[in-house]
Amino acid sequence: MSHFYLSHVRTVDEEWVASFFHDLCRVVAEYTGRSPEVVGVRGKSQSAEVSVDLLGRSTVLVVLHSPRYFSQSYCRAELSYFQRRLNMQRSRTGRSAEAVVPVMWEPDPTHLLEAVVPYPPLAVRSEAYRRDGLLHLLRLKARYRAAYEEVLKVVARRIVAAAEQLPEVHGFDVSGSHSPLGAPAPTPLGSQAVSFVVASTAQKDVPDERHSRQYYGKTSLDWSPYAPGEHEALVSLVKNTATALDFTATVLPLDEETVDRISREQEPEQLVVLLVDAWVAMRREERRLLAAVDERNPEATTALEPRSRDDVESVEQTVTLDELLNHTLPLMRGQHSEYDRWGLPDAQSFTSSLRKVLIRLQNEALKSVEAVPSPATPTEGLPTFPLLGRYSS
């Protein structure tokens, strides 16, 4: 576990951000007795990817707020991830923790830090920091060294204190849902809903032709194509990935009720991601249900097919499985896409494709509201932080 994840606008002020990150790791290491190399992490400086793995292994989020912070989809997603995690912690234990530490990188007169990031501000004496922000102190470190060191120590103490309050953050179900797996969950304000439909079977219903049954469990939602024996591993992966991009995820089995539901939604444009086990197409009833999903609006329905390279049986039956999918899902198989969707050989390639699916939806949502004027921002600031992750930047 890392003590903290640094969330910031990437490709901007990179030299100064790297310097602060290095110094903060040093101070946190001094307080904890750990190595500076393991106490903190951040996203790749030249990439807009959201690393669910790094977020999941970090206890505290340090936000470097600047006027551009909320214009970046990855910043919104990172903050949303921790917001939901803290909500889950509070609902499960009744305890709150200050595991988001807001730092003013540059002043934003339009959106005051305490208004858009509703967590306690840093209690520092430095007037220069409160007036001009941390970047100003860094640029003039020779003049403001004492003030800069004060900010480092205050942030580090907040990180260590929050880490002690949240010893079990690792492994949180970041979906934030108390509902039974697959049950509809309320959609938080600002979130886009996505339904994941798992087209697989319980172990007892696996087709006779399928001999490698270690990938299946008691229900179809236990299907674990990349981690045999680890039930719900795929479900956890898709929910965590969706949550990191600020989507509200519902996971459903492929059955009559699910097909009826996604065919009669009040919002026919809601995204449905079909997670396909190619072997299930050998069963007549599942072929009928898959065909019904295949006929759904192609702009709002996408299929992803995990087929692990370690699953020797599936690799040997590649031709047969491909022919089954071609026959059962002709429309989806015929769609051309800029990303891979079929025969995804490992969890990394699957996650990469899933992110692209969800980002495409964000882009479509952005197009749909471009003609709608945004409401004016109140002069006294926003009562809470802006909608998180709904639209990509």
Image (cartoon, rainbow, N blue to C red):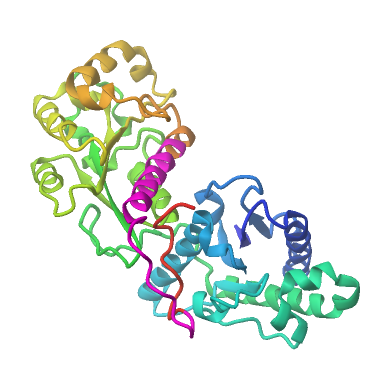
Say which of 352 and 179 sits in front: 352
Q: Residue at x 43, y 26 (%)?
A: 345
Say which of 170 and 105 sits in front: 105
Q: Position of residue 253 (x, y in %)?
A: 19, 43
**As displayed, is residue 208 above or below residue 53?**
above
Q: Main secondary structure of the magenta part?
A: helix
Q: Residue at x 30, y 62 (%)?
A: 177
Q: Report the label total.
A: 0
Q: Quadrant of residue 125?
A: bottom right
Q: Position of residue 152 (x, y in %)?
A: 75, 73
165 vs 346, left or right, is right
Quadrant containing the N terminus is bottom right
Q: Residue at x 60, y 73 (%)?
A: 101
Q: Quadrant of residue 65?
A: bottom right
Query: Which region of the structure is painted magenta?
Result: 352-381
Say which of 212 and 347 sits in front: 347
**As displayed, is residue 33 above or below residue 289?**
below
Q: Position of residue 76 (x, y in %)?
A: 49, 61
**As displayed, is residue 34 above or below residue 273?**
below
Give yes or no for residue 216 being in the magenta stretch.
no
27 vs 70, left or right, is right
